[in-house]
Amino acid sequence: MNWKRLGLLIILGLLSGIVFAYAHAAMQAPPPTTTSKAPTEITTTEVAAPTEALAVTAPSIELPAATQALLASLNQAPFQPERGDLRLVAISDLNGAYGSTDYDPDVDKAIALIPFWQPDLVVAGGDMIAGQSSSLTTAQIQAMWAAFDEHVRAPLDAAGIPFGFTIGNHDASGARGANGQFTFQQERDLATAYWQAPEHTPDVEFIDRADYPFFYTFRQGDVFFMAWDGSTHQIPPDKLTWVEQSLASEAAQSARLRILLSHLPLYAVAEGRNAPGEVMANAEQLRTMLERYNVHTYISGHHHAYYPGHRGKLQLLHMGIIGSGPRALIDSDLPRWKAITVLDIDFEQAESELIRYTTYDIQTLELIEYGQLPRYLAGHNGMVLRRDLELADLSTAEQSACQAKLGTALCS
C-alpha cells in the first residue's frame, strides 16, 4: 500500500473519533441556562379545587395576640366559610346592666375572634353601652364609652377592621317627652361627642355625615350603607324625607347593593319584645319604601334573638345578642342563642344567593343552621318567613295558623 495513502487514512480516522467524542459529550451536558424571565402573565400556580364548604383553619395574615390566644385555647378552629367578594361580620346588643362598664366575657370572645374571619367591615346593631337611665351622671356615661372603646372599638381598630354601627336605645335613646324634647338629651350629647372625636371616627367612606352618628350613609366596597336612628319606634317626618332622598341618590343607586342598619327591627321576632313600641312604627309602609329603592337587607338588634328572615323582597337579619339577656323566639322553646354572623356577599350570584350567612353560637362556636329555626314567626305586626323559604313553601296548616293569629293581610 502506498505509504502516503495509509498516512492519510490514519489522520482521517483520528479526526472522526475526535468529532464523535465531542458530539457525545455535548449530548450528555445539561441544557444551557438563560437570564430571560418568563412573562408574569403566563406564570401559573397550582390551586386546590374548591370544596363545597371550605374550612380554613388558619388565616393567611398575622393575627392579633388575643385572637391567637383564643384560637390556641380551642380544640379546633371555628369553621371558616368560603369568602365572598365582600365580607361583613354582624354583632349587636353588647351591653350589660344599667351603668355597667364591664362586658360579658362573650363580648370579649367575639371581638377577639373577629380577626380570624378577616372581615372588610364589622356592623353593629346598637346597644353598645348600658345607658337610658336619667340617674346616670356625665362621668358614668363617659366611663361606659371608655369601656366600650377598650373592649370593642380599639381592638378592632388595631386589627385594621372598619366599624359601622347604628345607635341603640341604651346608647342614646331618641325617646321624647310630652314637650317634644329628647328625654335622654345628655346621653345623645355624650354619644355624639364620643363618635365625632377624630380618634373614634370609623375608617369608612362617608357619604353624608351631617347628622352623624344618628343618621348617616357610607360606602364600603361596592355596598351602600345607611344607618338610621332606630333607637325608638318613630322616625320624624323630616328624617324620613332624608332617608328617601339618600336612597334615591346617585351614590345609593350606583352601588351594587344597599343595606340599612337599625336598632329596632321592622317586625317582632322575640318574646318580651312582641309589642308596639318594640318595633318600628308603620313597618309595612317603611318596607314598601325600602323595597322601592331596592334595599336588599335590613340589619337590626334590640330583640336579643337571632332570626334570618324576609318579608316580601326585603331581607331581615335580626341579630342575636352577644351581651347579656338573650331572648326566646316567638312561640318557640329553642335555645336562646347568643349569636354572631359572618355575611359573605357574592355580587355575581342570583338575588336569593347574593348574601350568604354563617352564624355561630358565640358560646360553643357551633353553627346555627336555618333548619334549626322556625319556618316562620308570627309577631303582632306581621309574619316573617325564614330566609330560605317562600310563602308557597308553607303548608296549608301553617298558613291557617298564622291567619288565625294575625289575619290574612299580615300573613301574606
Image (tube, grey):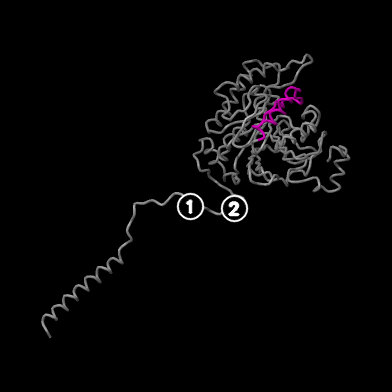
Q: Which mark is residue 45?
A: 1
* Residue 84 image offset from top left, x and y in percent: 60, 44
Q: Earlier in the sequence, mark 1 or mark 2?
A: 1
**Helix, strand or loop for disc 1:** loop
Label 1 and label 2: CA atoms lie apart by 18 Å
User: Residue 411's image quarter?
Assistant: top right
How many numbered badges does the structure rendering display? 2
Left or right: where 17 falls relative to 143: left
- Look at the picture and state if 188 lies above or below 285: above
Which residues are the magenta region? 226-253
Asked if residue 239 is among those painted magenta in the image, a careful observer would answer yes
In the picture as drawn, the residue positioned furthest to the left comes out as: 3
> SS for tag 2?
loop
Give the residue type at disc 2.
Thr
Q: Identify the residue under disc 2.
A: 51
Q: Position of residue 66 (x, y in %)?
A: 53, 35
Which image quadrant is residue 364 in? Answer: top right
Q: Nearer the viewer, mark 1 or mark 2?
A: 1
Q: Nearer the viewer, residue 202 or 325?
A: 202
* Residue 222 located left or right of residue 18: right
Disc sitting over residue 5 in the figure: none
Report if residue 231 lies within the magenta region. Answer: yes
